[in-house]
């Protein structure tokens, strides 16, 4: 039976996350970007909303079940506040969710209670590599079996909070397929760059480059491994949901600005050139939002085409986010180009969705 | 309630059944109907009437609910969802055919949206009678398209006979011929004519009148020759001193200081815009499926899951088309789901039409482009679908008018503030 209405519990979460996004993330976003520093309190406050905790079963220290649908609803709200802040709050999921989705019982017991039971702690994941046609299913980082351990070699980029990470999931190519591997802090052969990564946006999120030289690691799911596609699709719908949040933020700013700004004796929103821009922004956002919801729902319900749906949602969301955030800047005109105004940062963040993957998971 | 994308069973069953109709009754004669404009496919009309009657749902655009089985749990209404699925599937078969599926169409939708219970009982029952029956909406005039407030047709009350006397010229009346001309094989249809009862009152003076088939003074003056949807008759109708009974006016017969009359028309559109969107998306899906089939025959596989940098241009185009089509369909579903659940859907309804107009046009254009001569040749139906598709962005409010409606809603502007 079709329905487009979040349930009561989801609505409560949306409201709580929305409040945090509006009152905490949003006001801090500009300074955090410029100073390349997120207030620590902000991240712990976001963590206390209990999103990851509520998606982890009781058996592993949480108090709920994972639902990609609930996830995309919450993430859109959080990313609407600020993308860098949202990604920072959710960074421990980059470790915990893959363990939940693909880990062995032992791995789940070993890590999950520790992560969800404690304060926010830097557990993270490393997927991306520096190649123009980066493909999560054809990684250059390699893994080789050696006894019951695996030996990793390669270089990973854009790894959030890698510097202080307690442990990280590193994705590597094992005989032609992608698998996740648990790498512990201080492992021999693991080196994290001193310098943080410098990218177009997301400057408040500390990301590092990680080198692996014969690093010994354990495979997610043990000897039999795991289904990487489940993890990949969980990353794809997360990316799509975050893109909708960023786009909505730009749309709202632009809409409010257009209703304030005078030109030729009227508000610019009263000009069809601007009004039509806004109508199209709203329409495209809604289209991708629904595509994302459906993909998440298909993942939750193990539908046959769930992975394709997640791929389509991510792909569509990247284009939509670029279109909407670009127009956000355009509607502000010259003022949109000035860093005092929020829309230029949203455009830089919006561009990222076509290039980034694995910085957030649901 | 919780977010759910599982299609209700009755919808899936209906879809399967209609696909058979589309494949067996529409597609084989699609080309013939395109090349013989104004021919009437009685087989199809009679078959559809019988089939829809047996499903209890003859009547066109008015939502019909299944009677719940005794003792069964009460289910939320899905009448509009059923219509959207039904229309998408029929349009996938052939949108021209779909437009001459017997039933009340926009005419009945207007009665449904603005009529009293008595009027609904009187005018809507006929669609379930023995013979297939049509109704149509007459709004557009030579000088009034999307700007419906420019309508010049007039209705004056003759107090002696208690009849309305209507004068005016109406054009682009979909199924106007089948609704008004008294064909032997058809039941008595009607047209709903929009006219002003008080030109000085502007939109507040606008009313809709039910004009029965064969009413003296009303004439079909022309059947248009069109780019596409050629199986569908598009009529020009003139009304010269046409008399209709007093009780055929939809809504209040007096002019108040409000725009209820006009709002009646707009309420019709809230209900029908997503359905028109659905009809476009059926055409787009047909085109996309044909494209993928031809590519496959030629050894071109679409490799989902690859980064864009590794895809060929054709793969990118197809993937983009799928994103457009799927997301657009979800917007239609949401809009009709809202209508079923009595949620105000003016915004969602118009957004779904904006999107579907774009998508239907783009998908069919791209499919023709990618297939080169196969796309342009009349050997295949694709070129016809491309021509059929274009109307989606025009009728029931052009893409531009719908953008205006969407913009007013999101900005909180009145028509005067955003013109």
Image: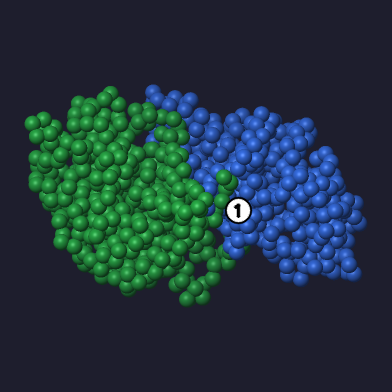
Q: Position of residue B100 (x, y in %)?
A: 27, 59
Which color is chain B depicted in? green
B76 w.r.t. A260: above or below: below
Q: Position of residue B265 (x, y in %)?
A: 30, 39
Give the structural element (helix, strand or loop) at label 1. helix
B220 w.r.t. B401: above or below: below
Q: Is residue A49 left or right of residue B42?
A: right
Residue found at the far front of this picture: B71
Say which chain tag 1 marks: A
Q: Label 1: few (<14), some or many (≥20) within 10 Å?
A: many
Residue A9, quarter of picture: top right
Q: Position of residue B290 (x, y in %)?
A: 42, 68
- What's the residue at 20%, 59% (across, down)? B186
Residue A170, quarter of picture: bottom right
Chain identifier, blue in the render: A
The image's colouring method is: by chain
Q: Is residue A196 left or right of residue A186?
A: left
Q: Is residue A355 left or right of residue B78?
A: right
Residue A310, quarter of picture: bottom right
- What's the residue at 72%, 42% (across, down)? A51
Q: Which residue is mark 1?
A: A297
Q: How many marks?
A: 1
- What's the residue at 75%, 33% (across, down)? A45
- What's the residue at 60%, 43% (across, down)? A7
Between B16 and B172, the one lying in front of the other is B16
């Amino acid at each position: 039976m079709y329905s487009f209405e979040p349930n009561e519990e989801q609505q409560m979460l949306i409201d709580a996350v929305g409040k945090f996004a509006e009152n905490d993330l949003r006001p801090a976003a500009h300074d955090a970007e410029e100073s390349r520093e997120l207030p620590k309190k902000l991240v712990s406050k976001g963590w206390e909303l209990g999103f990851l905790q509520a998606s982890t079963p009781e058996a592993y220290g949480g108090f709920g079940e994972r639902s990609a649908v609930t996830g995309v609803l919450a993430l859109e709200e959080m990313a609407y506040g600020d993308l860098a802040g949202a990604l920072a709050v959710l960074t421990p999921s980059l470790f915990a969710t893959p363990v939940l989705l693909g880990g062995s019982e032992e791995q789940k017991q070993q890590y999950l209670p520790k992560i969800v039971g404690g304060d926010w702690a830097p557990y993270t994941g490393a997927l991306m590599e520096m190649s123009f046609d980066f493909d999560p299913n054809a990684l250059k980082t390699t893994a080789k079996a050696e006894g019951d351990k695996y030996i990793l070699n390669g270089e990973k980029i854009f790894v959030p909070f890698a510097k202080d990470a307690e442990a990280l999931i590193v994705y590597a190519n094992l005989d032609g397929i992608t698998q996740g591997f648990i790498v512990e802090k201080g492992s021999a052969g693991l080196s994290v760059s001193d310098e943080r990564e410098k990218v177009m946006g997301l400057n408040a999120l500390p990301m590092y480059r990680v080198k692996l030289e014969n690093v010994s690691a354990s495979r997610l799911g043990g000897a039999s491994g795991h289904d990487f596609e489940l993890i990949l699709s969980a990353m794809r719908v997360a990316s799509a949901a975050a893109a909708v949040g960023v786009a909505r933020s730009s749309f709202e700013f632009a809409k409010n600005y257009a209703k304030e700004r005078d030109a030729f004796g009227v508000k610019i929103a009263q000009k069809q050139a601007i009004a039509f821009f806004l109508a199209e922004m709203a329409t495209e956002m809604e289209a991708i939002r629904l595509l994302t919801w459906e993909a998440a729902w298909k993942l939750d319900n193990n539908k046959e085409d769930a992975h394709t749906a997640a791929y389509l949602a991510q792909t569509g969301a990247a284009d939509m986010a670029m279109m909407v955030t670009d127009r956000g800047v355009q509607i502000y005109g010259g003022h949109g180009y000035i860093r005092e105004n929020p829309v230029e940062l949203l455009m830089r963040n919006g561009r990222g969705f076509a290039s980034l993957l694995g910085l957030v998971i649901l | 309630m919780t977010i759910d994308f599982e299609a209700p069973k009755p919808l899936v069953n209906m879809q399967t059944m209609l696909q058979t109709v589309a494949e067996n009754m529409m597609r084989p004669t699609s080309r013939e109907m395109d090349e013989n404009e104004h021919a009437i496919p009685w087989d199809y009309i009679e078959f559809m009437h019988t089939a829809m009657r047996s499903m209890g749902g003859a009547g066109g655009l008015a939502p019909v609910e299944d009677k719940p089985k005794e003792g069964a749990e009460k289910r939320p209404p899905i009448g509009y969802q059923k219509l959207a699925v039904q229309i998408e599937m029929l349009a996938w078969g052939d949108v021209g055919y779909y437009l001459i599926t017997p039933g009340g169409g926009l005419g009945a939708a207007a009665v449904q949206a603005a009529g009293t219970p008595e009027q609904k009982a009187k005018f809507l029952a006929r669609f379930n009678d023995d013979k297939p029956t049509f109704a149509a909406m007459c709004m557009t005039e030579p000088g009034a398209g999307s700007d419906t407030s420019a309508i010049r047709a007039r209705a004056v009350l003759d107090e002696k006979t208690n009849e309305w006397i209507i004068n005016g010229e109406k054009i682009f009346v979909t199924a106007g011929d089948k609704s008004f001309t008294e064909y032997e094989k058809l039941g008595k249809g009607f047209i709903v004519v929009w006219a002003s009862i008080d030109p000085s009152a502007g939109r507040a003076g606008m009313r809709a009148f039910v004009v029965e088939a064969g009413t003296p003074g009303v004439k079909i003056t022309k059947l248009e020759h069109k780019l596409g949807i050629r199986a569908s008759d598009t009529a020009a109708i003139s009304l010269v001193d046409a008399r209709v009974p007093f009780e055929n006016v939809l809504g209040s017969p007096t002019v108040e200081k409000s725009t209820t009359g006009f709002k009646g028309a707009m309420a019709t559109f809230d209900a029908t815009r997503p359905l028109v969107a659905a009809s476009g998306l059926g055409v787009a899906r047909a085109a996309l499926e044909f494209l993928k089939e031809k590519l496959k025959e030629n050894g071109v596989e679409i490799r989902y899951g690859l980064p864009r940098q590794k895809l060929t241009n054709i793969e990118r185009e197809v993937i983009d088309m799928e994103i457009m089509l799927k997301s657009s369909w979800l917007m239609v579903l949401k809009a009709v789901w809202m209508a079923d659940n009595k949620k105000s859907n003016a915004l969602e309804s118009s957004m779904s039409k904006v999107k579907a107009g774009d998508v239907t046009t783009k998908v069919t254009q791209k499919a023709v482009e990618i297939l080169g001569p196969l796309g342009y040749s009349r050997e295949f139906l694709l070129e016809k679908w491309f021509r059929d598709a274009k109307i989606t962005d025009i009728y029931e409010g052009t893409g531009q008018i719908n953008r205006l409606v969407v913009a007013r809603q999101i900005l909180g502007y009145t028509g005067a503030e955003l013109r």
